[in-house]
Image (tube, grey):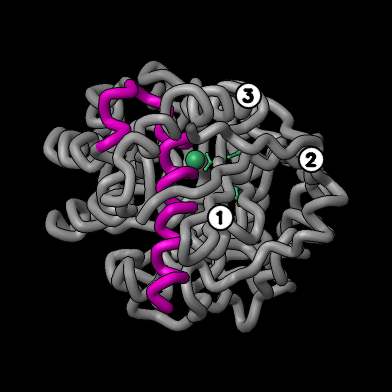
């Protein structure tokens, strides 16, 4: 399969409400989409890097640059023999930039599967027709404001609530939500905001019967997480630390986590994400699908991934209207707390070019010569 065209689409998509985390307020998605053409089909991929390097070191401008300057030329050099399965190996000499690599691999996989008439879900090994939907709730200015947001999500049918926490916004919001909803599956995400010295504070979350605490400590502190896991009762889940299937195996061997959040962008693509799932499953570690505020393109892929058998916990795979008033694909909707896994060829969703055009800031065709 030869690449006949590659375009980078940049678009600005405002969130329906501000989403605050321990690392900042992200008012709108600075969307980067990769569109590829092959002789048989087109394909789309979404890059989940944020506008600024605050979740991880990647950011959108750098991703666009590395794709155009270093990644696409390597894929073009492969010529007719290119397949989605080869992308990660061909790009391996370029260090880092997993989100940029994942976007390209996804676009090529989408094109390949569309040409073959196969769905992304079937290709990955999905075993469910719909996946349970959790929702991630940002840090708020007050507890009443948080309770309003949570109750609106509960009323919509979300089956699991995740609260963003940081020092100064942890025990009190968790206690308030737990008091209002004694039985709802509840978890927290600290996005690396604590240190091992905070273990006693984090142990105060023990009475609230949380499903897990996600990434309390810095990304490179696996030993700290292993130590923390001995000092608190809430199961430790890793997000930022799990950058590959090998990192997952290391974390599990060290006892740094008992649950893993899988995000394809963070590990360099959906094929590596499946390997993380496989490693976890072989070790009896539960996984769930994380989210990066994706448009319908990335959401379609996430929902298919979340339908693999090892995804035994609800993911941050919310409905499109939790994020955007108008998505660039047909919206994913909540049905009984679940979103449906697309079944059509490739990602199974189509980009609405008219909607995309309205929010597009630039389209850059790459020179493939
Ligand atoms: O896509 O629903 C979503 C967001 C889920 O909380 C979420 N993601 O660390 O897990 C995480 C964050 C990272 C992105 S925040 C901009
Ligand atoms: Mg997280």
Dot 3 beta carbon under 8 Å from ligand 1: no
Q: Residue at x 60, y 76 (%)?
A: 337
In the picture of the structure, the residue carrying the numbered disc 2 is 12
Q: Position of residue 314 (x, y in %)?
A: 46, 64
Lower position in the chain sequence, tag 2 or tag 1: 2
Secondary element at tag 1: strand
Lower position in the chain sequence, tag 1 or tag 3: 1
Magenta stretch, main secondary structure class: helix
Q: Nearer the viewer, mark 1 or mark 3?
A: 1
Question: Is 17 situated above or below 354?
Answer: above
Closest to the observer, 313 or 228: 313
In the picture of the structure, the residue carrying the numbered disc 3 is 61
Q: The N terminus lies in which quarter of the figure? A: bottom left
Q: Is residue 141 left or right of residue 23?
A: right
Magenta extent: 90-117
Q: Residue at x 72, y 33 (%)?
A: 26
Q: Sort mark 1 into few (<14), some (14-19) or many (20+) by Cα contacts within 10 Å.
A: many
Look at the numbered discs 1 and 3 and tell me whether their residues touch, using CB distance below 8 Å: no
Lower position in the chain sequence, tag 3 or tag 2: 2
**Does any portion of residue 96 appear in the rendered image?**
yes
In the picture of the structure, the residue carrying the numbered disc 1 is 44
Dot 1 beta carbon under 8 Å from ligand 1: no
Q: CA distance from mark 1 to mark 3?
A: 18 Å
Q: Position of residue 52 (x, y in %)?
A: 64, 23
Q: Residue at x 82, y 51 (%)?
A: 357
């Amino acid at each position: 399969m030869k690449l006949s065209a590659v375009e980078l689409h940049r678009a600005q998509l405002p969130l329906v409400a501000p989403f605050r985390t321990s690392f900042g307020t992200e008012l709108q998605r600075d969307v980067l989409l990769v569109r590829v053409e092959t002789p048989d089909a087109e394909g789309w991929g979404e890059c989940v890097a944020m506008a600024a390097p605050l979740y991880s070191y990647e950011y959108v401008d750098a991703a666009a640059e590395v794709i155009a300057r270093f990644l696409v030329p390597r894929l073009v050099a492969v010529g007719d023999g290119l397949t989605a399965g080869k992308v990660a190996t061909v790009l391996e000499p370029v260090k880092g930039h997993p989100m940029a690599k994942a976007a390209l691999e996804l676009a090529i996989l989408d094109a390949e599967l569309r040409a073959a008439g196969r769905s992304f879900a079937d290709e990955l090994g999905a075993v469910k027709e719909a996946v349970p939907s959790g929702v991630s709730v940002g840090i708020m200015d007050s507890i009443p404001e948080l309770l309003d947001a949570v109750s609106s999500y509960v009323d919509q049918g979300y089956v699991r609530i995740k609260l963003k926490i940081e020092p100064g916004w942890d025990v009190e919001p968790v206690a308030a939500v737990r008091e209002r909803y004694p039985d709802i599956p509840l978890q927290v995400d600290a996005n690396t905001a604590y240190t091992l010295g905070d273990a006693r504070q984090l142990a105060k979350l023990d009475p609230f019967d949380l499903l897990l605490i996600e990434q309390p400590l810095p990304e490179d502190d696996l030993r700290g997480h292993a130590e923390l896991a001995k000092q608190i009762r809430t199961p430790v889940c890793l997000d930022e630390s799990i950058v590959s299937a090998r990192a997952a195996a290391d974390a599990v061997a060290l006892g740094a986590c008992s649950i893993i959040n899988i995000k394809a962008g963070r590990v360099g693509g959906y094929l590596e994400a499946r390997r993380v799932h496989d490693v976890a499953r072989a070790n009896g570690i539960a996984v769930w699908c994380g989210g990066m505020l994706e448009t319908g393109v990335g959401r379609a892929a996430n929902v298919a991934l979340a339908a693999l058998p090892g995804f035994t916990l609800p993911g941050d795979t919310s409905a499109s209207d939790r994020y955007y008033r108008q998505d660039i694909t047909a919206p994913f909707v909540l049905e009984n707390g679940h979103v449906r896994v697309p079944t059509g060829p490739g990602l199974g969703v189509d980009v609405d070019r008219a909607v995309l055009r309205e929010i597009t800031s630039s389209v850059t065709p790459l020179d493939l010569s």
